[in-house]
Image (cartoon, grey):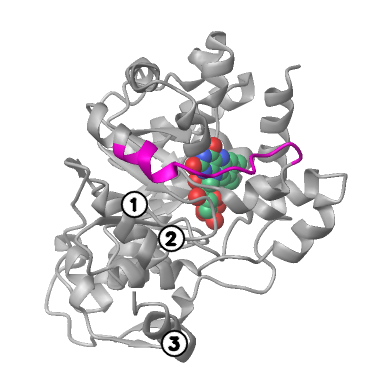
Amino acid sequence: ESIIGARKADHIALCASGKVEFRQKGTLLDEVHLVHDALPERHVDSIDLGTTLLGHRLAAPVVVSGMTGGTPEAREINRDLARAAEALGLAFGLGSQRAMVLRPDTAATYAVRDVAPTALVLGNIGLVQARDMSSSAIRELVDAVGADALCVHLNPAMELIQPGGDRDFRGGLKVIERLVADLPVPVVIKETGCGISRSVARAVRAAGVTAIDVSGAGGTSWVGVETERARGPERLLGDELWDWGIPTGASVGLSADLGLEIIATGGLRSGSDVARALALGATAGGLAAPVLRARQEGGYEGALAFLRHIVAGVRALTFLAGCGSSAQLRSAPRVLGPTLRAWLEEAGRR
Ligand code: FNR
């Protein structure tokens, strides 16, 4: 099997195992307390969860975050998860399309449009890969899968731990500017578990980006994933950096007033987490590893049931917080804990 294929299989197995979550650091979403409304005066079924993300209408503010592609197993995972997203009116992200670049014969492992004809589908490529590609080659990746937007992922911490990973990150912002100008679909700047600071969000906004996926700390640790796979000196460094990153809740709150659409990913494990992220200013919540686990245990039906449960949680929290729509969560009464407040105050100054 190809080297990329072996890596993908490792990633799926490790992330599904639960062994590569952050160890000490959490998302800080547990420090968002929405205030209970004991007299809601509405029918729970009247709660409006409809959300516009990237110009696309979602039935609920939930994204299945990009995970995989490139192998036969990845194909089945993508198809099951895309079909579940389609059934529930959610968004679905493909994993990095780098394999497609290196081995065009893997394109079929990313093909989900036949099972998800109307879902918001997000393509995916790393910034370091995009740097070495022409805009037309990237456009072909988007077109080949019929993506509505392209997630460009940032992963400097992970690259440092990955044996043979990239070390030179110069010129990244220029690449983002180029992609925004050249691609016919929106570009979503996405981290991979370490979060996006306010200054990075401002920089990409100035480059023309209108949406970010914070992918913050507190869920799957990609430094952890690469640490588990590393054999050389990177292993020790990976162990040290395992919990590096901006907690997801902080990352969302820090960029909430910048006029960007924000997907809150990284350690969301329930509909309550999605609701809390919305209260901090996110447009939608994204989940990766827990959806993968549900699918690995229960196939398509397992993933569908899990996502239904997530949506039910968002609905319940919206209702109990006294809101008529999930969009109103943003201005719902809430109490923030001290660590989250400290992050928002001290990291929010620039
Ligand atoms: C990922 N993630 C990811 N992100 C990305 O931009 N491109 C990718 O190829 C992948 N691959 C990938 C594989 C697997 C198996 C997992 C679990 C995750 C990162 C993912 O989209 C998300 O940002 C993080 O995993 C944090 O969310 P969770 O897992 O804590 O819900």
Identify which residue is drawn at 16% across, 59% down. Answer: 48
Q: Is mark 3 within 8 Å of ligand 1?
A: no
Which residue has dot 3 on it? 342
Q: In this view of the protein, can residue 349 be seen by the observer?
A: yes
Which residue is situated farthest in the front direction here?
170
- Type of amino acid under label 2: Ile
Q: CA distance from mark 1 to mark 2?
A: 8 Å
Q: Is residue 13 above or below residue 258?
A: above
Give the residues drawn in magenta, as a range.
Answer: 163-177
The picture places residue 162, in percent across and down from the top left corner, at 72, 43
Q: CA distance from mark 3 to mark 2?
A: 17 Å
The answer to whether 111 appears left or right of 75 in the picture is left
Determine the secondary structure under disc 2: loop
Q: Quadrant of residue 103?
A: top right
Disc 2 residue crowd, few under 14, some 14–19, many 20+, Cα 10 Å: many
Identify which residue is drawn at 21% across, 57% down. Answer: 49
Name the quadrant of the N terminus: top right
Which residue has dot 2 on it? 196
Instruction: Say the numbered circle drawn on residue 142.
Output: none
The answer to whether 114 appears left or right of 52 in the picture is right
- Is 13 magenta? The answer is no
- Type of amino acid under label 1: Ile
Disc 3 residue crowd, few under 14, some 14–19, many 20+, Cα 10 Å: few
Instruction: Say the numbered circle drawn on residue 212.
Output: 1
Comes first in the chain, label 3 or label 1:
1
The picture places residue 107, in percent across and down from the top left corner, at 49, 14
Q: Is mark 2 within 8 Å of ligand 1?
A: no
Determine the secondary structure under disc 3: helix
